[in-house]
Image (tube, helix red, strand yellow):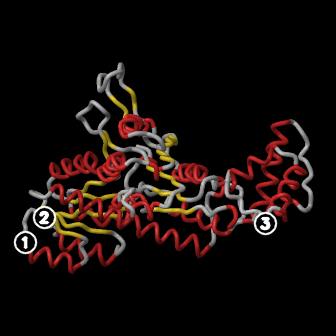
Amino acid sequence: MSNDNRYPSFGVLLVDDEPSFLRSLDIALERKAGINHSYRCSDSRDVMSIIAREPIGLVLLDLTMPHLSGEALLQQIVEEYPDITVIIISGLNQLETAVSCIRLGAYDYVVKTTEEDRLIGSIKRAIRAQEMRLENQEMRRRLLTDTLEQPEVFHDIITQDKSMRSIFQYLEAISASRQPVLISGESGVGKELIARAIHGLSKRSGPMVCVNVAGLDDNMFADTLFGHHRGAFTGADKSRAGMIEQAAGGTLFLDEIGDLSLASQVKLLRLLQEGEYYPLGSDRPRRLQARIVVATHQDLARKQQSGDFRKDLYYRLRTHQVEVPPLRRRKGDIPLLLAHFLAEAAEELGKAVPSIPKELPVLLANYEFPGNVRELRAWYSMPPASIAAGCCRWRCFGGH
C-alpha cells in the first residue's frame, strides 16, 4: 500500500498474545475507522524493538500477557517514548487496575470483550490528539526557522506578503492530516488556489474534485456527493459514482459551504463524523477516502449563532482553518499581481508587455478592491492608460 494512503500518518501497534484477537481488531479498525497503518505483535518481548524500528505513535496494549505484562510495558514505553500514546485493552473490568494504568500514563483503559464501540471511539480521539501534537510541533519548527519546504506548491499564488507566507507554513504543517480544512475569506481572494495548494502538499495519489454547493437542494447535494444506484429514484437508469468516490485517494473541495441547507449540513456532518456514506439506493456503506476541504466567503461564526449553520458542523469543519486576507490588507502584492496579469495577457495576445504608467501603482494602492485579486485580474485586458483614467475618476468621485 502506498504511504500516501496510509492512515494515520504514524503507526498503530496492536499488542496481544492472541493472534486471532489481533486479526479481528485489525479488521475492525480498518472497517470502522479507516485505520490501515497498523502493526501486530503477539510476543510482548518484541514490543520495544518494533517501537524503535517503526514510526509508532499509538500502542493498543493487552494487560495480561506471558513474558512481559502490559503494565510493565506501559512503564517502559512512558519512560523511553513519552510522546507515544498508549491505550490499555483488558479482558477484565477492574477499576483499581484501570486507575493504576492511568496514573502510570495510559491514555485510556478499555474492556475488550464488551466495549468495541468505546474502544474505536477512544482510538479515534487518541489519533486526533496525537495528530494535533505532531502538527503543533511541526508548526513551531517552521515558524521558528521561517522555512517553506515545498515553495513550488504555492507557485500559482502571487504574493510577497508575510501573512500569506504564514498561511503557507501552516498548510505545510497540517499537510499530513486527514482532518477537514476550512478556508474563509472574501470573494476573489483566491480560496480555490489555497485549496489546490493543500491538495498538492498532501501528495495524495487521487485527484482534486471541486463542487460548488451553492444552489444545490438537499436531494441534489446527496446525489452529487454520494452518487446513486440504478433505480434509486425516477430517472436513475444507471448507477453513477458520486464526487466522494471520484475524489477517492485525493481531495474533495466544497466551495460556498455557507450556502448549504440545514438538511444537507446534517448529511455532511455525518460523513465527517462516521467517515462513511451511503450512495442513494444502497444499504451498504462506503468509506470516505478523500480529504474534505471547504471554503466560504460568509461569516460562519455569525451564521451558527443565528441558527443558519449547525454549530456542531461548524466546529467540526474548523479543526484546521485559514483566513485569506483581502487584497487591501496586502497592498504590497498589487505591483506583483499587476505585472503578472499584464504579462499573462500579453502572452495570450502575442503582444509585447505594455509599459505601466508610473502613477498607476500609487493609484491602485489607494483603491480598496472590493473584488480583490479577481477584480484586479479582470483589468488585465484593459489598456494601462484606461486603468489609470479609471482610478483618477474614482478619486475625483470620492472612491477609496
Q: Residue at x 61, y 50 (%)?
A: 193
Name the foreground residue: 223 vs 78.
223
Name the foreground residue: 111 vs 353.
353
CA gap, disc 1 to disc 3?
70 Å
Question: Marks 1 and 3: which is nearer the front?
Answer: 3
Q: Earlier in the sequence, mark 2 or mark 3?
A: 2
Q: Residue at x 57, y 59 (%)?
A: 185
Q: Residue furthest top?
A: 237
Q: Is residue 34 visible?
A: no
Q: Position of residue 98 (x, y in %)?
A: 14, 74
On the picture, is 155 further left or further right than 31? right
Q: Which residue is mark 1?
A: 94
Q: Amino acid at mark 1?
A: Gln
Q: Amino acid at mark 2?
A: Ser
Q: Position of residue 388 (x, y in %)?
A: 87, 55
Disc 1 element: loop
Q: Amino acid at mark 3?
A: Asn
Q: Which residue is mark 2?
A: 90
Are the residues flagged by discs 1 and 2 in contact, CB closer than 8 Å?
yes
Q: Which residue is mark 3?
A: 366
Q: Residue at x 67, y 58 (%)?
A: 370
CA gap, disc 1 to disc 2?
9 Å
Q: Earlier in the sequence, mark 1 or mark 3?
A: 1
The C terminus lies in quadrant: bottom right
Question: Marks 2 and 3: which is nearer the front?
Answer: 3
Mark 1 Cα-neighbour bin, 10 Å: few <14, some 14–19, many ≥20: few
Q: Position of residue 313 (x, y in %)?
A: 36, 57
The N terminus lies in quadrant: top left
Q: Residue at x 26, y 68 (%)?
A: 86
Mark 3 Cα-neighbour bin, 10 Å: few <14, some 14–19, many ≥20: some
On the picture, is 336 further left or further right than 84? right
